[in-house]
Amino acid sequence: MPQVLLANLPYLLQGAGVTLLLTAASGVLAALVGAVAALAQIFGGPAGRALGTLYTLAVRGVPLIVLVFGMYYALPYAGIELGATEGGILVLGLYFGAFTAEVFRGALQAVPRGQWDAGRAMGMYGRTLLLLVVVPQALRLAGPPFVNTCVMLVKGTSIVSVIGLWELTLAGRQVVERTLAAFQVFGGVAAIYFVICFALTSLGRAMERRLPAHAG
C-alpha cells in the first residue's frame, strides 16, 4: 500500500465514521418519512394518496445535488438557518424517504389478502390489525430492499460535501490537496466505500435468504 495512503488512513477512517453517522441518522429519518408517505398512499384517502404520490414522484424526479443546493441557498431566504450537518441529514432523509416510501408501500401491498381477512376474523381491525398482523410481515418483505436503499444512501452522503459537510469524500479531497497523490488517496476512499457497501449488501442478501422461511 502506498506510503501516502498509509500515513493518511486514520484521517480517512475518521471521515468514514462521519459517513456512517450520516447514513444512520438519515436512514432513520428516511424510514420515518417513508413509513408516513406509504401509509398515506394506502390508507390516507384521496388527499393522503395525492400528497404521498406527489411527494414520492417529485423528490425522486429531482437529482439529489439539486435538492442539496436548494436547501443550502433557499432555506436562509425563508428564515431557516441550518448547519451543514443538520441540513445534510434533512435533505438526505427527505430524498431517500421517497424511495423508502415505495419500498414500504410495495411491502404492505404484498402481504396476502388472506392475512388481512384472518386478522379480521379474529376480531382485529384498524390499527390493531396493522400492528399485529400486517406490519410484521411487511417489515420482513421490506427488509432487503430497504438495506439496498441504505447502500444508495451511503454513496449519497458524498454529495453533501459540496456544502462543506466534512465526511469521507471531503476528507479525501483535503488529503489530495496536501499530497497531490490523487490516485492513491481516492483509491483508498473508493475501497472504504466498497467495504461499507459490501457489508450492507451482504446483510441484504442474508435477509433475502431467510425471507422464504418466515414470510407468510
Image (tube, rainbow, N blue to C red):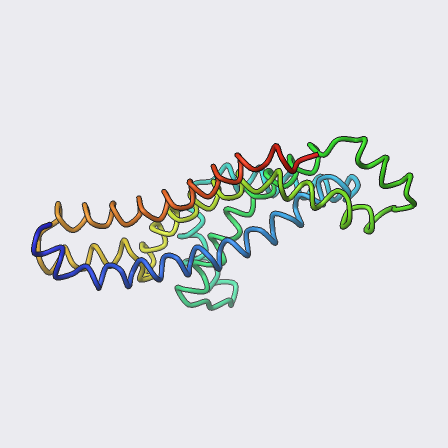
Residue at position x 46%, y 46% in the image: 150
- The picture places residue 200, in percent across and down from the top left corner, at 42, 45
Number of residue marks: 0
In this picture, residue 90 sits left or right of residue 66: right
Residue at position x 89%, y 40% in the image: 120
- The picture places residue 76, in percent across and down from the top left corner, at 46, 64
Which quarter of the picture shows residue 210?
Answer: top right
- Please name whichever residue, 215 or 107, is drawn nearer the observer in this view of the structure: 215
Residue at position x 74%, y 44% in the image: 48
- Please name whichever residue, 16 or 99, is drawn nearer the observer in this view of the structure: 16
- Please name whichever residue, 14 or 82, is drawn nearer the observer in this view of the structure: 14
- The picture places residue 65, in percent across and down from the top left corner, at 39, 46
Question: In which quadrant of the rendered image does the C terminus lie?
Answer: top right
Asked if 68 appears above or below 75 in the picture, the reply is: above
In this picture, residue 112 sits left or right of residue 76: right
Asked if 170 appears above or below 45 in the picture, the reply is: below
In this picture, residue 38 sits left or right of residue 21: right
Q: Residue furthest front?
A: 213
- The picture places residue 175, in percent across and down from the top left corner, at 16, 59
